[in-house]
Image (cartoon, helix red, strand yellow):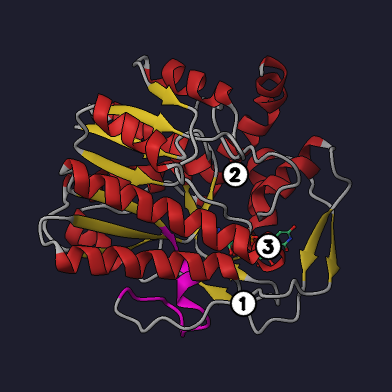
């Protein structure tokens, strides 16, 4: 199939492009490069030895999106493009609501206009709020702690209502848990512009000596060792989950957790990283981060049953692959 991947120069988008190409699909990327680099597009081509068309556009720009649909016969869309920093969303709610919601609505509108009926949406486990773990797709969503999470819950609602009104429009809403790691080549990985938000990029920057220690946000949660527990999933498993969801799209809207079903604490991640890579990660316990919850992990059974997909790569692979990319990353930046 010919697939438009918005945000395809980003972390999860680029890995999904590789998985799509490896599965025999063709890929067109639309990305405004606000949190990614054009070099990543070149790396996707290098890894897959396939061509990738790239348009540097803002997906909230309906005319620019329309031009792509007019030029290319598309079979489906995977929509990653969006702002995703939880803390920033609290400081800049309108920036987040406008960008994340308008981009989703523009894409859905143009899809309808051009008769493109397959829509895969990048959602997040954040939408569960402080539900009881393990999170199940059938759960009632609770308010999230931040505008970013609300934009994901609202986008899901918008897409579900469109699918309900237009049965031919089939939507997969994929709720990610904690994506980490990198493609085994080390050519692409989690390379946010500026200061990272997530745990693993901080760990690899400590490993590289760019940071002197990891700050662990609280060790007084009611968990195995007091630190936060999350469901870490290898980004290539997550990418392959998108291909499975695309291949299984039928009528209506379907929600899937993309996680491993296993919870791992921050200290367990640090220990796994140290053992996997033979590098010590100094850390300091500091105050809790506002908005953090103690537990977040998936009931991953629905995707397994409906999509025949499960995460295959273990924590060790997540840590070794993340480190391999970080070591090679400077070369990527220098090549920009
Ligand atoms: C993981 C654990 C922190 C950094 C976020 C978004 C979620 C999704 C994934 C987009 C927590 C601890 C972290 C650090 C730390 N993103 N930590 N020191 O918050 O679970 O989820 O990213 O969809 O929507 O909310 O991920 O990697 O920030 O934190 O101790 O320097 O690591 O407290 O327990 P999180 P994270």
Q: CA distance from mark 2 to mark 3?
A: 32 Å
What number is the disc on residue 92?
Answer: 3
Q: Main secondary structure of the magenta part?
A: loop
**Would you name the residue on which mark 1 appears?**
293
For label 1, the SS is loop
Residue located 29% across and 42% down the image = 77
Q: Can you say which quadrant of the picture contains the C terminus?
A: top right
The mark closer to the camera, 2 or 3, is: 3
What number is the disc on residue 37?
Answer: none
Q: Position of residue 6 (x, y in %)?
A: 41, 40
Magenta residues span: 123-137
Ligand 1 within 8 Å, label 1 CB:
yes
Say if mark 2 contacts mark 1, CB within 8 Å: no
**Mark sitting earlier along the chain (1/3):** 3
Q: Position of residue 239 (x, y in %)?
A: 38, 43
Residue located 45% across and 15% down the image = 46
For label 3, the SS is loop
Q: CA distance from mark 2 to mark 1?
A: 23 Å
Q: Residues within 10 Å of mark 2 (few under 14, many from 20)?
A: many
Relative to 28, is 129 on the left or the right? Answer: right
Residue located 65% across and 71% down the image = 228
In the picture, residue 123 is in which quadrant? bottom left
For label 2, the SS is helix
Task: Between residue 158 and residue 217, name the one nearer to us.
Answer: 158
**Mark sitting earlier along the chain (2/1):** 1
Relative to 314, is 90 on the left or the right? Answer: right
**Would you name the residue on which mark 2 appears?**
319
Say if mark 2 contacts mark 3, CB within 8 Å: no
Q: Position of residue 100 (x, y in %)?
A: 49, 56
The mark closer to the camera, 2 or 1, is: 1
In the picture, residue 198 is in which quadrant? bottom right
């Amino acid at each position: 199939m010919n697939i438009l991947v918005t945000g395809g120069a980003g972390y999860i988008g680029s890995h999904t492009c590789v998985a799509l190409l490896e599965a025999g699909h063709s890929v067109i990327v639309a990305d405004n490069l606000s949190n990614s680099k054009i070099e990543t597009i070149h790396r996707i081509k290098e890894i897959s030895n396939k061509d990738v068309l790239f348009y540097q556009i803002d997906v909230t720009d309906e005319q620019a999106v329309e031009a792509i649909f007019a030029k290319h016969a598309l079979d489906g869309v995977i929509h990653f493009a969006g702002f995703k920093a939880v803390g920033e969303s609290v400081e800049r709610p309108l920036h987040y609501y406008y960008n994340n919601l308008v981009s989703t609505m523009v894409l859905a509108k143009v899809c309808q206009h051009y008769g493109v009926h397959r829509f895969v949406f990048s959602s997040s486990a954040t939408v569960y709020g402080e539900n009881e773990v393990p999170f199940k797709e059938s759960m009632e969503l609770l308010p999230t702690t931040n505008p970013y999470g609300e934009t994901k819950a609202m986008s899901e609602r918008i897409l579900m209502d469109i699918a309900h009104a237009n049965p031919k429009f089939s939507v997969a809403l994929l709720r990610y848990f904690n994506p980490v790691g990198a493609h085994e080549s080390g050519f692409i990985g989690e390379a946010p512009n500026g200061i990272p938000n997530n745990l693993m990029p901080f760990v690899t920057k400590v490993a590289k000596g760019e940071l002197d220690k990891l700050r662990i946000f609280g060790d007084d949660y009611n968990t195995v060792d007091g630190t936060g527990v999350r469901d870490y999933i290898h980004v290539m498993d997550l990418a392959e989950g998108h291909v499975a969801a695309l291949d299984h799209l039928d009528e209506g809207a379907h929600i899937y957790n993309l996680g491993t079903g296993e919870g791992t604490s921050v200290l367990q991640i640090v220990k796994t990283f140290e053992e996997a890579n033979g590098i010590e990660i100094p850390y300091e316990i500091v105050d809790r981060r506002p908005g953090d919850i103690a537990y977040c992990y998936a009931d991953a059974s629905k995707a397994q049953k409906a999509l025949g997909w499960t995460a295959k790569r273990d924590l060790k692979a997540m840590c070794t692959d993340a480190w391999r990319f970080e070591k090679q990353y400077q070369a990527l930046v220098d090549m920009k």
